[in-house]
Image (cartoon, rainbow, N blue to C red):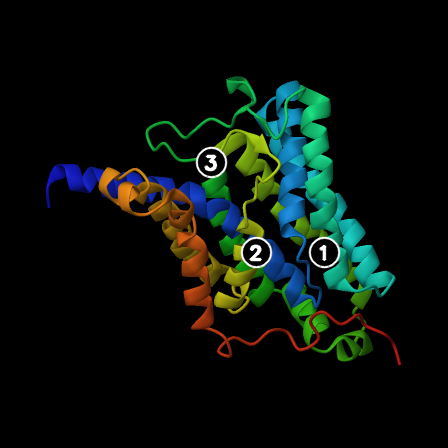
Amino acid sequence: MPVEALLQLAEVARLTTFSMTPLLLAAIGEIITELAGVVNIGLEGIMLLAGFTAVAAAEAWGPLAGLLAGVLVGALIGLLHGWISVYLKGDQIISGLGINIFALGFVAFGIEALWGVRGYYTPPPEAKVPRIPGLGVSPTFIAAIVIAVVSYYVLYKTGVGLKIRAVGEKPDAAESVGVHVERVQLAATIVGAALSGLAGAFLSIDWLAAITKELPAGRGFIALAIVNFANWNPVLALAGSGLFGFFWTLGEWVKNIGTIKAIIPIPLLNTIPYIATLIVTAGFIGKSRPPAHIGRPYRRE
């Protein structure tokens, strides 16, 4: 294989690490949340709000503060969603939709109010997360892999993970042996949303290095598809994120090929990752098994 071809493959692999990272973080967070029996479809809104906050914090105190701010915003939204879903017994789908709709309006307004521009703002270089020297990848990517492995161990090899999975499968049985169902569900929802917040911060001050009113661009919904694809397994989510991240990178790479760009319109090329998501996910419908009590508020009899 020519050296030039190898270099192109290496570059595609490097770019895939960026495109897969937000998908992986959001998917792991949703796996934790759903294993506890709570559904959060507000991943798009969480990433958008966290990305906006991360830029503001990174400009003021540096990129590390930006990442932490994104995590904090995600955790606070998870607290709100968890309180509505777990303690108020509200409709989890409506709560998630509310997060998404609020984020769309708030961030569009916030960009103009804070920076005086409409729809798009690029932070200064000092607010961006630096790459790992010699590798050109983000430290957040390495952190995401560690989080995936640790999450699998905690969920499937520890007592804490057993409690999380128990309240998502049979909450009444879990409570009969002393597990506080609502507390476990709320904690899982907060942790899951915090990881989606980190995904949003990664988008705005790391990979894309910009905040826009359409920052997630459907990545939250792709993360939801990855959860099903991975059968609620964080390690399989790592593989799924790599697959979907590759298709995302492939779509961007193809757009730079003049002959293809001249034949196929750019908007159509932009659909490549979404079409791939539909095709791959369709192949796993019926083959994965969600937690038995997912999406239903627990009510004591």
Identify whether 136 is placed above or below 180.
above
Badge 2 marks a residue whose secondary structure is helix
Q: Residue 143 placed where, x, y %?
A: 50, 43
Q: Which residue is mark 2?
A: 221
**Looking at the figure, which quarter contains the C terminus?**
bottom right
Tell me where residue 96 appears, x and y as whole percent: 72, 56
- Residue depicted at x 72% and y 71%: 167
Give the mark nearest the N terminus, 1 or 3: 1
Distance from disc 1 to disc 2, alpha carbons, whole Å, reads: 12 Å
Residue occupied by mark 1 = 96
Secondary structure found at label 1: helix
Residue under the image location 56 percent in, 66 percent down: 157
Q: Which residue is mark 3?
A: 139
Q: Is residue 206 left or right of residue 194?
A: left
Local crowd at mark 2 within 10 Å, few (<14), some, or many (≥20)?
many
The amino acid pointed to by label 3 is: Pro
Tags 1 and 2 touching, CB below 8 Å? no
